Amino acid sequence: MQLKCAYCGKPINGKYFKDYWGSSYCKEHLKTAPQCDYCGRLIGKTLTKGGLTYSDGRRICGICHLTAVTDIERGRKLLQEVHDTLETEGIKISPFKPEFALISRSKLKQLDKGGGERQGFAVFNRQAVNSKIVSFKMQIFVLHGLPEASFISTCAHELMHIWFYSHNSTDTSPALTEGSCNMASYLVLKRQKTLEAEYLIKGLFDDRSRDYGQGFRKVQKLADRQGIAGWLEYARTHKRI
């Protein structure tokens, strides 16, 4: 039986591409068909029940859009769930009363002076008197319209940044910081037990960047050897990994 293209429905002749989800496409479609920024599928009426392009240029397929977080109250609920999951892993952020907002890509770029294509941003300010914290304020911003798995992963990443801030670890190397933040994402995604979470986990391990990718894999190996508590103690007491 001849293989058919999942995008155009025609028999595949010659070279073809197979995506993470098991769908095969005529290779030429990779140059012309829109691709979902969150799952990598080619966006088509049959394959993904269509899709859309956000006003900031991000493309999302119909499958991912079904779980897109666009409601602030749903976002707060998911953020709290992520916080509670991390707490069971020993990553404690307390008290937890953050300001939370779903924001545009342009607003996120204004907040993140470092550039890049981040999906979230965290701010932590506190006031201490005689070494005792008397007030603090945390703000968590997440890109509007992320699919649920990506939203959860982003929340975990940003909450780990808050954890570093709360432990005065503001001069830690990017590899240890971002690697640890991706480790928090990994811990939360592992519990989701969905194909979307597995896809994002694969992305963590495949990431070739020095800080987010290599840093994560070093942290993950450290946690494998010393346990979660050992990794967190290392993060509290070291500047590099």
Image: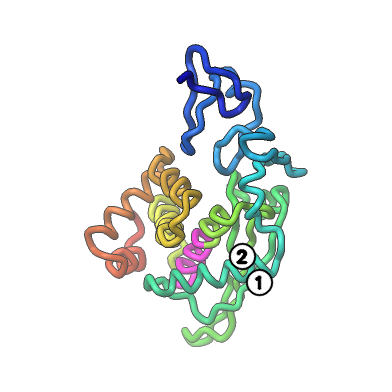
Q: Using the rendered image of the protein, determine whether residue 177 is visible from the camera's viewpoint.
A: no
Image: magenta residue range: 156-167
Q: Amino acid at mark 2?
A: Ile
As displayed, is residue 143 above or below residue 139?
A: above
- Is 210 displayed left or right of 66 in the figure? left
- Based on the displayed image, in which of its 4 quarters is residue 123 positioned? bottom right
**How many residues crowd mark 1 within 10 Å: few (<14), some (14–19), many (20+)?**
few
Measuring from the top left, give residue 86's x and y in whole percent.
44, 69
Nearer the observer, 216 or 34: 34
Identify the residue under disc 1: 99
Identify the residue under disc 2: 140
The residue at the far top in this view is: 14
- Based on the displayed image, in which of its 4 quarters is residue 240 positioned? bottom left
- Is 24 displayed left or right of 66 in the figure? left
The residue drawn where x is 57% and y is 76% is 126
Nearer the observer, 85 or 141: 85
Nearer the observer, 135 or 228: 228
As displayed, is residue 194 above or below residue 34?
A: below
Q: Magenta-highlighted stretch: main secondary structure?
A: helix
- Distance from Cα at disc 2 to Cα at disc 1: 6 Å
- At mark 1, the secondary structure is strand
The residue at the far left in this view is: 225
Measuring from the top left, give residue 195's x and y in whole percent.
47, 49
Q: Amino acid at mark 1?
A: Glu
